[in-house]
Amino acid sequence: MIDQKMIARVVGVVCLGLTVACSGGNPGLPSGGGGTTGSSETGGTTGGGTTGATTGGTTGGTTGGTTGATTGGTTGGTTGETTQGDGAIIGDGPVVEAHLDQLQIEAGEVPLEVLRSHGELLFTANFNTLDGAGRPEATGTGADRSMRMMPDNFNRISAPDANACSGCHNLPRTGGGGDNVANVFVLAQRLPFVNFDGGEGDGDAPQTLTGVANERNTVGMFGAGYVELLAREMTADLHTVRDLALERARQQGRSVRLPLITKGVEFGAITAGPEGTLDVTEVEGVDVDLIIKPFHQKGAVISLREFSNNAFNHHHGIQSSERFGDGVDHDGDGYTNELTVGDITAATIYQATLPVPGRVLPTSPEGRAVVARGEELFTGSIDAGGFGCATCHVPALKLNNPVFTEPNPFNPDGNLKPDDVAAPVEVDLTMEGPGPHLARGSDGSVMVPLFSNLKRYDLGEGAEIELNNEQLEQAGIPTSHWLTKKLWGIANEPPFLHHGRASTISEAIDCHGGDASASRAAWASGTPEERASVVEFLETLQVLPEDAESVVTFANDSGVMGDDPAVTFHMTQDEIVAGRVSHEELFEHGKNLFRASFNALDGAGRPEATGTGASRARREGNEAFNRISGPDANACSGCHNLPRSGGGGDNVASVFVLGQALPFVNFDGGEGDNFEEHTLTEVANERNTLGMFGAGYIELLAREMTVELHALRAEALARAEVTGRDTRTPLIVKGISFGAITAKADGTVDTSEVEGVDADLIIKPFHQKGAVISLREFANNAFNHHHGIQSSERFGDGVDHDGDGYTNELTVGDITAVAIYQAALPTPGRVLPKDPEAREAAMLGELLFTQIGCGTCHVPALKLDNPVFTEPNPFNPDGNLKSNEVEPYAFDLTTQGRAPRLPREADGSVIVPAFTDLKRHDMGPELNNERKVQAGIPTEMWLTRKLWGAANEPPYLHHGRATTITEAILAHGGEGEEARERFEALSDAEQNQIVEFLKTLQVLPEGETRLVID
């Protein structure tokens, strides 16, 4: 049971002397709640009168103070929330607590900064059921389907597949592109619930992974406002030509053929007949309606508004009133007007005003000369000795008027149109919104250096990485046709190509065919130095830091000509042992490895090996990635990024655990499926990504508990040997009971009464099953499984186990660095609500949390005797560096871990408020959804979730299917059933108090030094 004195000591640690009045129970218990501190990552005041508008998570204040905001957007449903004081919600609430009124926007009553702030909130919001997230009775196209509820509320293929827009759009920061792990399965949203069983969810037809949808990588949105304006002007030009042809044909009484040219880009020709007919057979690179559609990689979406309306419904099950009707609950989730017309305007303006990408030039004159030569080759015609790339990737297009108006005059039905509003929103992109900005010319125009002509081309087929790989035609566009990629920002938004299968720029260029064949041939005929200079030029096209003063900045040369590996430096274990590497250098190297978007030059991919290391038939090119069996991601931070790098993940990044044992899952029963029939629900165990903050303390706790368990086993064996009788010994460590063992006089041990830990009595604190011993083991596993990066300590020094031509892809020292990085990440803390009634509710909720038995498993704190982290772990399994093989590296988490850190007690120990017992429990039938047994652990058994940091790392439960804290609590069964029943027996107000307390447990803003903020 929980020692109440321990709880009081936790308060001293967590609250750091903060005095909070308590009513009843133990004096000094910490209070807390939702709300944020105003950081860019966790929300707070973002300007323009917006009070507490969050940018993600389930916590935060209210946008009720926003000029033009209303609280009548999302309606319906029973939320159970209580509103107190100044409007703060006690308990679970929607992420978007207030909605914008379009009429107030049109009346000029909503300032631009408020529009952008609210748009950012919508773009980063981890929507939950109280926002109306999910679409139980509708597909992503809006068609009817049979009711699908938890755990069928998400589907990684047919969707809803994500919690937030920023779950995918986050490279190099929010608004950018995405890791391959976040790829979208375009057109699968037409199906009710893809399971690859040929049933109703599959449209009553057999499906395969490569045939059910078109897998696409996420494209960045920086500079999107300029792109939309260019498309509008080009559309207007084309329509003018069309109208002129019709007028001339009518006047002259004969057919008139006119070329379709706008901004120097040719779109074929159009022929008008005297009777008003149009022959569009010569139109090229645009639909016959002559509307330039600059979004989607097929060029299938007209505007940011259309893109937003589509995506909110497809990916999140959030249905806007302008698309589905005012007051209409189209998807049967009990909510209407989930986003208002004003909300969509705000989301559009936020994207339209994202900064433009720029250039990062080498600091050295020699480096700049190489870049200049590369740009000359890129832009030069083939006849003049260049590569002719700029024929399609036009360096810049002239925008006559950079004032963005919303809505778009060419919007299709289902989206707001100019005739629907009294006055459009107007934003001068050269002056308003965050920088850097593009400058106007003397005539008021702007040259937009997007490196695209916004035209579609046939890119051919037959390349090593196939571009004509899709089996489904989208919007009538041939499968081999693609919109010319906008290259600005490309260098720090990898991977490349529509499907993300190219991990280097050279690979992407090599795959061009069809209309680009001549340019590719010119590129191929160039010298290695010439090709490298072109890559050097393209590497200057980057998304710059927000509010950069100029669109051109400078940085040191990488030292590598052409494509670079993501990791240009490797660390040896000998350097670490010899003390030639500082702790800061070790941490930074580990951080770089954790954030690296690995490419082929790092050895990324595992052509001849599965994620378990078994051999497989060679898979490369388009089959270098597989979202189910892996490799499935480019970077660790591709999944671990909530609320920032190192944290948990959006459902879009959920991992299909044990799927990596198969060669290449395609659900066709072939070699890649091991000649077995599989379905999505049974091929693997889909798991949400857990955060790593505070992981060093967790591993140390597990080590100490393991040592104590082993000591109890040794003592029992010794007594049995001395007495000659069976000796039964309870296994209780740090106040946690793990059952009992019986030692036999013959030296054997009966482990049949052991509970919540394996028979080896090693506490395994990582993975949601409690199946991984250490951060080092976790890293070695993940690098191979997810990225195809194989460490020398796991696969052998100098061994190319996966047949990709690279050995020692990560050194022993590299793995040490990434383990130290994760171990030294800050600890989560508390965010206390400013509202006094919410703060009191959180305080009472913490008392109730313990009183109803939640703290029996979610133990508020465990005592760590020694906070000095040593690497490697003494209990590491084979295939991982062990402590007897090397002099361990040691550092003190309380002084050398990243802030905020936990303090030592007077006796040198540390109280770790992780809210877990590090024990597995039977969680009952509702959470027993998995079909595959991992590491011999029964499917109903789960490691007690660490609750510190949970509030701003949604969603919840092992599979991420709970979007609110209450939903997660109500799913508890088995050993958690009594606590759940007590929770259900509480009044609504008391339930909300518990939730309010849990909302205080947050990952704190980067750079925060305090463990408690308010």
Image (tube, rainbow, N blue to C red):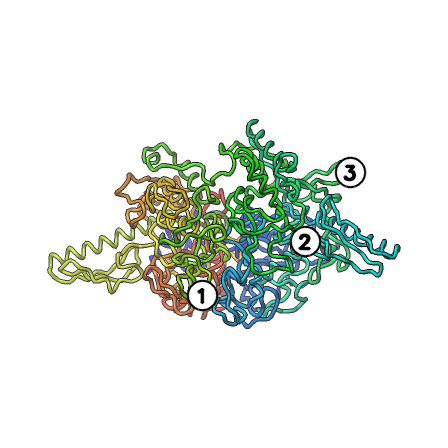
Q: Looking at this rendering, what residue extends furthest in the top direction?
A: 365
Q: Amino acid at mark 1?
A: Thr
Give how far apart the Cα atoms at labels 2 and 3 are.
27 Å
Q: Quadrant of residue 276?
A: bottom right
Q: Quadrant of residue 213?
A: bottom right
Residues at discs 2 and 3 in contact (Cβ within 8 Å): no
The mark closer to the camera, 1 or 2, is 2
Is residue 433 placed above or below 532 in the rendered structure? below
Is residue 831 placed above or below 685 in the rendered structure? above
Q: Is residue 263 left or right of residue 529?
A: right
Name the secondary structure under disc 2: loop
- Provide the residue designation for mark 1: 681
- Provide the residue designation for mark 3: 443
The mark closer to the camera, 2 or 3, is 2
Between 456 and 916, the residue placed more toward the observer is 456
Residue 649, x across and y down, in percent: 48, 54
Give how far apart the Cα atoms at labels 3 and 1 are.
60 Å
Q: Which residue is located at x 39 percent, y 39 percent?
A: 896
Q: Is residue 284 left or right of residue 588?
A: right
Q: Amino acid at mark 2?
A: Lys
Residue 964, x across and y down, in percent: 50, 62
Name the secondary structure under disc 1: loop
Badge 2 or badge 3: first in the primary sequence: 2
Give how far apart the Cα atoms at labels 1 and 2 are.
37 Å
Residue 492, x across and y down, in percent: 54, 42
- Provide the residue designation for mark 2: 293
Residues at discs 3 and 1 in contact (Cβ within 8 Å): no
Between 943 and 137, the residue placed more toward the observer is 137
Between 782 and 697, the residue placed more toward the observer is 782
Q: Quadrant location of the N terminus?
A: bottom left
